[in-house]
Amino acid sequence: MRVVHYVGMDYDTYERARRVFGGPAYYHKRNDARVDTEVGPEDVVVYGDPTYREWVWDASAVPDKYTK
């Protein structure tokens, strides 16, 4: 199944892009190694900020007050 990956955008930008490109969707807060491993050959990637981050963003390792 084709999935649209939205990479490196704030939530408002994601919502606007989702209206244009649709879904099913997968949201990536940052462009990091996780994006490379999760995008399939049939998938579409929409970039807000294409800057590559060396470190993987893991929101589960950070208290909620820092990720909202």
Image (spheres, rainbow, N blue to C red):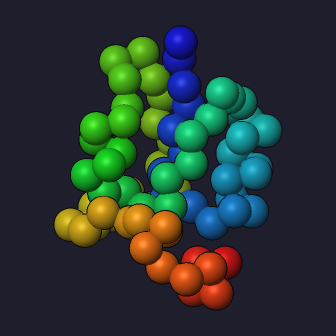
Q: Where is residue 59 in the image (x, y as percent from the top left)?
A: 49, 68
Q: Where is residue 43 in the image (x, y as percent from the top left)?
A: 45, 23
Screen quadrant of the C terminus:
bottom right
Residue at left offset 62%, top offset 79%: 64
- In the image, is residue 61 above or below residue 49? below
Residue at left offset 50%, top offset 61%: 29
- In the image, is residue 7 above or below residue 40? below
Drawn side of residue 65 relative to residue 51, left or right: right
Drawn side of residue 55 relative to residue 58, left or right: left
- In the image, is residue 32 above or below residue 27? below
Q: Position of residue 23 (x, y in %)?
A: 68, 28
Disc count in the image?
0
Picture quarter containing residue 41? top left
For the residue pair 39 and 65, the one nearer the viewer reads as 65
Residue at left offset 57%, top offset 61%: 9
Picture quarter containing residue 25? top right
- In the image, is residue 49 above or below residue 38? below
Q: Where is residue 32 in the image (x, y as percent from the top left)?
A: 31, 57
Drawn side of residue 46 relative to residue 21, left or right: left
For the residue pair 38 and 10, the one nearer the viewer reads as 38
Q: Seen from this angle, which residue lies furthest bottom?
A: 65
Q: Seen from this angle, which residue lies furthest left?
A: 54
Drawn side of residue 43 relative to residue 53, left or right: right
